[in-house]
Image (cartoon, rainbow, N blue to C red):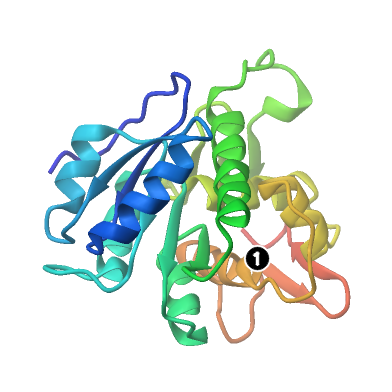
Amino acid sequence: MASSILRCHAMPYSILFVEDDAELAELIASFLARHDLNVQIEARGDTALAAIAAAQPDLVLLDIMLPGKDGLSICRELRPVFDGPIVLLTSLDSDINQIMGLELGANDYILKTTPPSVLLARLRNHLRHARGSTASTPAPSGSPGHRRLGFGQLLIDPLSRDVRLDGHSIVLSTSEFDLLLQLAQHAGSPLSRETLLQATRGVGYDGLDRSIDVAISRLRKKLGDNPDEPFRIKTVRNKGYLFVPSSW
């Protein structure tokens, strides 16, 4: 498989839906198609990665229980080479599976019992955010939002979306990079979950969403932070998360 999967950004949005229940897949695909989303269905887990590479979708909608290879394994293998949203759509109402899915790089975890209109709204939100973060017109390189950020051995380039630590390239998903950039641009000031969710995903904090916590955990692991006593991205009680500029 190629080392990277590139996605085209021509309208309308395209979705590859990995689902082995043919009737359910057709029902959801037909509903989404009526709302201007192009949906391609792939029925097996062991052929999903090849199908994604060929289709270059804007978003991958992924069941967990699949023949050939399960959705969590697909998510783990896909995340390093696919920068678009990965949404798990499953009948498994399990906190453990939700945490695992988000840890492996999924952007969202949605139950199949969710009303179609809510599913549509959540998919559109992920698609808008992904396209906005990768296809927006770049500002001049000298503008504040696009200057390289340097903290000791850490270098963040907003234009190339490249992160290097001690000279080594750090592979981050789109959502992880956006989160790190927000934290680094406000280095020394704690940011709340609500602020981070709004800035990176365009959604409000409902008091239950743990996706920011999971993403912070992934960032700490990739950036060499101490998971037990973080010193680079600290948790500030009742305030949120703090990027420590002097710790790199």
Residue sitting at x 28%, y 37%? 5
Rendering coords of residue 145 (x, y %) = 73, 29
The number of callouts visible is 1
Q: For this view, does 102 lie left or right of residue 148?
A: left
Q: Circle 1 is placed at which residue position?
A: 212
Callout 1, which amino acid?
Answer: Ile
Please give left or right for residue 177 compared with residue 14 in the image.
right
In the picture, which quadrant includes the C terminus? Answer: bottom right
Q: What element does badge 1 sit on?
A: helix
Q: In the figure, residue 226 lies in which quadrant?
A: bottom right
Task: Please name the residue shown 68% across and 12% down the image.
Answer: 140
Q: Residue furthest top?
A: 140
Q: How crowded is mark 1: few (under 14 residues within 10 Å), some or many (20 or more)?
A: many
Q: Can residue 83 be seen in this view?
A: no
Q: Whole-percent x and y of residue 196?
A: 75, 55
> Is 237 or 36 nearer to us in this picture?
36
Can residue 24 be seen? yes
* Quarter placement of the N terminus: top left
Q: Residue at x 67, y 66 (%)?
A: 233
Q: Quadrant of residue 245?
A: bottom right
Q: How far from the left and from the top, in percent, is residue 86?
A: 43, 53
How far from the left and from the top, in percent, is residue 99?
50, 78
Looking at the image, residue 158 lies above or below residue 65: above
Query: Which residue is pictured at 71% across the width and 16% down the height?
Result: 142
In the shown orientation, is residue 7 left or right of residue 125? Answer: left
Of the pair 112 and 222, the residue shown nearer to us: 112
Q: Is residue 104 above or below residue 144?
A: below
